[in-house]
Image (cartoon, rainbow, N blue to C red):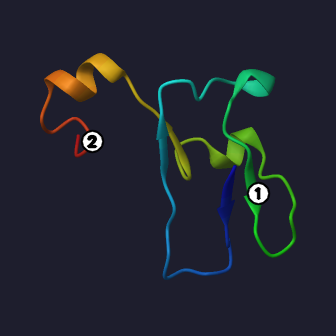
Amino acid sequence: MLLIDQADLNVHHIFFDDNADEGDSCIVDTRDVVTNEIVSYKKQMGRYVCKVDPIKAILEPDYFIQ
């Protein structure tokens, strides 16, 4: 579970995971901490949740910067 406050512009949570797949198979449950509403897959991907290639993350020192 990834709890975020969408109204707080001073904090930006990012969850890096290699299993952040589309739809029900996405293992990250992103919720708004104030309203407890589920953040849609479309809204969370690329903003709060980033899919990671584990091999590239290990082999490329600047993977997370790129």
Q: How many marks?
A: 2
Mark 1: few/some/many CA within 10 Å (<14, 14-19, 20+): some
Which percent across, then down, holds residue 65? 22, 46
Q: Observer-nearest residue: 31 or 45?
A: 31
Earlier residue among tags 2 and 1: 1
Quadrant housing residue 37: bottom right
Residue named by callout 2: 64
Q: Is residue 27 above or below residue 36?
A: above
Task: Give the SS element for disc 2.
Answer: loop
Which percent across, then down, holds residue 38? 83, 52
Quarter occupied by the C terminus: top left
* Residue at screen point 56% across, 24% down: 19
* Residue at screen point 68% across, 61% down: 3
Task: Give the SS element for disc 1.
Answer: strand
Q: Is residue 45 above or below residue 9?
A: above
Quadrant housing residue 36: bottom right
Mark 2: few/some/many CA within 10 Å (<14, 14-19, 20+): few
Q: Which mark is residue 14?
A: none
Quadrant housing residue 28: top right
* Residue at screen point 87% across, 71% down: 35
Residue most extreme to the front = 1
- Residue 53 located left or right of residue 36: left
Residue named by callout 1: 31
Q: Separation of disc 2 and disc 1 at Cα? A: 24 Å
Q: Is residue 23 above or below residue 47?
A: above
Q: Tag 1: residue type?
A: Arg
